[in-house]
Image (spheres, helix red, strand yellow):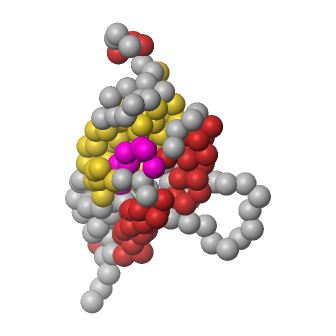
Amino acid sequence: MDTADDVIDIFLQPGEYFVGDASYRIRTLLGSCVSITLWHPTRRIGAMSHFLLACRDNSPSFALDGRYGEEALLLMSDELSLMGINVVECRAKIFGGGDMFPHHGRKNMAKVGQKNGEAARSLLQARGIPIVSESLFGVGHRQIFFNINSGDVWARQIKPVDVPVPESRRRRA
């Protein structure tokens, strides 16, 4: 790849994942969601997820779903395997799990991000995939850029602007 024009840009929506070679750059925006990136340094093949929840409830399913961290990692691992990549030879990075509503008393929303980040760590550790970097938790959303050619991932965390809560929506003590 000689120029930035040669790079194919992929944008992940929530619940999506992508696996590709050095000709791709993957981007996404994360709030409480989490992205796992996997990169094989020798083959320069990588994968990235954008999952919403750590795992699904006990409802039956006939297909894996990228909206759930556990299943997104399986989907990426399977696709990497089809490309001849042993996932334990990859380097993992984890991003996201932010608290999007820190001033609105929605503690359950903060817990979703925390659970997602902790689940990503546990899933990777259980599979023996080394985690080389992470940018988890905190307040606000993140912009993520993954250059599969180099394995570099850039994360920019953007904190929410404090917006005054109207009198009618304030809780009374």
- Total labels: the figure holds 0
Q: Residue at x 32, y 29 (%)?
A: 150
Q: Residue at x 35, y 41 (%)?
A: 144
**Spot occupied by residue 123 in the image (x, y as percentages of width and height):** 47, 62
Q: Is residue 35 visible?
A: no
Q: Nearer the viewer, residue 157 or 131?
A: 131
Q: Is residue 35 above or below residue 83?
A: below
Q: Could you tell whether 59 is left or right of 158 in the image?
A: right
Quadrant where the N terminus is found in the figure:
top left
Quarter of the figure with residue 160 = bottom left
Q: Nearer the viewer, residue 77 or 157?
A: 77
**Residue situated furthest top in the rendering:** 2
**Spot occupied by residue 10 in the image (x, y as percentages of width and height):** 48, 30
Q: Could you tell whether 61 is left or right of 49 in the image?
A: right
Q: Is residue 40 magenta?
A: no
**Spot occupied by residue 48 in the image (x, y as percentages of width and height):** 46, 42
Query: Magenta residues?
Result: 88-96
Q: Could you tell whether 143 is left or right of 51 in the image?
A: left
**Residue situated furthest bottom in the rendering:** 173
**Spot occupied by residue 3 in the image (x, y as percentages of width and height):** 34, 11
Q: Nearer the viewer, residue 79 or 86?
A: 86
